[in-house]
Amino acid sequence: MSHFSRMTRAALALASAALLSGGLATATAAEAHAAATEIIIIDGYTQTVKESSGFPVLCPTNQVLLGRSHSGDENGNTTYYCGLILIDGQQVRVSPPTWSSSQRESNSFFAASANQVLVGRQHSGDENGPTKYATATMSAGGREVELTSHRWSPGQRESSSYSKSGDDEVMVGRQHSGDENGQTRYQYARIAD
């Protein structure tokens, strides 16, 4: 990764030099830094579990949830997709998780607090069973990473669902109603640059 970071820094330096030589030398240092912020999200750990097992799934240290898929009823498989985040070539640090209280899956709604991201989930039983979510904060360069532009995905049937974050996004919420034939939606937020 250090080779990639060096190449990225070199490309940014060349681009800055070209802008400055083109008569744009009036840019402030703050503007140059803001324009140079680079966010890279790398697919990481993936885990598949039986949905009803009650087994808590947590992304590994310094990874966050990017997506989830599920097939079938409560005895079907759920797959969780985690990822690493780099900001200006530095890996983002993720705090230890905090678990939410349980809620009934068939009428569940969870949205993480401001600037928090999902890092895990636990569910037991069928649609009447409990679901909990694990959240965490992110930091880079000693500063908390801010999240903006929250959006909900379109609803999809839980029994054949797949959703993954878009560019520069992380998962911050989920909503589900009914059984495996009911609708599931995901909330994503964009990493502020």
Image: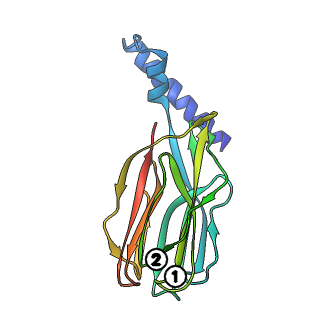
Task: Return the residue found at the far left.
Answer: 154
Residue 72 as seen in the image, left or right of residue 181: right
Residue 53, horizontal then vertical, whole percent: 61, 83
Which corner quadrant of the image does residue 45 belong to?
A: bottom right
Residue 120, horizontal then vertical, whole percent: 58, 64
**Amino acid type, label 2:** Glu
Q: Camera-side residue: 149 or 6?
A: 149
User: What is the CA distance from the residue labelled 2 to the residue labelled 1?
Assistant: 6 Å
Residue at point 67%, 53% (across, down):
96
Residue at point 60%, 38% (across, down):
140
Q: Is mark 2 on a helix, strand or loop?
A: loop
Q: Camera-side residue: 33 or 142?
A: 142
Which residue position is annotated with label 2? 105
Which corner quadrant of the image does residue 3 belong to?
A: top right
Residue 112, horizontal then vertical, whole percent: 48, 55
Which residue position is annotated with label 1? 129
Q: Is mark 1 on a helix, strand or loop?
A: loop
Contact (CB < 8 A) between labels 2 and 1? yes
Q: Can residue 167 be seen in this view?
A: no
Residue at point 67%, 40% (across, down):
2
Q: Is residue 120 placed above or below 75 in the rendered structure?
A: above
Residue 85, horizontal then vertical, whole percent: 57, 48
**Amino acid type, label 1:** Gly
